[in-house]
């Protein structure tokens, strides 16, 4: 969050990505901010199951981020 506060002024646009990945035995759902052509993870949740996420799981990860970044204009990019 410090990078966001330092590099982006209130009201500026942030591009966020959402993605789920399987890493070893962990199923991780991640939200990252795009910064200098890199995706920096800012929030994640380890899911207690294998496979893709459902809408309820997606909302559970996205809601806290929306609250934290309410000062910014957000563009959220994900795949289906």
Image: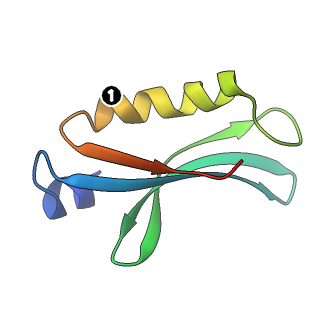
The residue lying toward the viewer, choosing from 74 and 57, is 74
**Which residue corresponds to mark 1?**
67
The residue lying toward the viewer, choosing from 78 and 50, is 78
The secondary structure type at the circle numbered 1 is helix
Percent position of residue 66, x then y:
37, 32
Q: Is residue 54 above or below residue 44?
A: above
Residue at x 32% of width, y 28% of height: 67
Percent position of residue 2, x then y:
24, 55
Percent position of residue 45, x then y:
62, 39
Q: Is residue 77 above or below residue 39?
A: above
Q: Is residue 59 above or below residue 50?
A: above
Percent position of residue 35, x then y:
34, 69
Q: Is residue 52 left or right of residue 59?
A: right
Residue at x 16% of width, y 52% of height: 12
Tell which residue pokes out farthest to the bottom in this image.
37
Total labels: the figure holds 1
Residue at x 10% of width, y 54% of height: 9
Q: Is residue 55 left or right of residue 38?
A: right
Task: Sort mark 1 into few (<14), some (14-19) or many (20+) by Cα contacts within 10 Å.
Answer: few
Structure colour scheme: rainbow
Residue at x 57% of width, y 25% of height: 60
């Amino acid at each position: 969050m410090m990078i966001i506060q330092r590099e982006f002024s209130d009201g500026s646009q942030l591009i966020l990505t959402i993605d789920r990945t399987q890493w070893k035995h962990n199923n991780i759902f991640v939200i990252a901010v795009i910064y200098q052509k890199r995706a920096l993870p800012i929030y994640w949740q380890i899911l207690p199951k294998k496979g893709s996420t459902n809408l309820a799981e997606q909302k559970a990860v996205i809601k806290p981020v929306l609250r934290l970044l309410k000062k910014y204009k957000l563009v959220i990019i994900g795949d289906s």
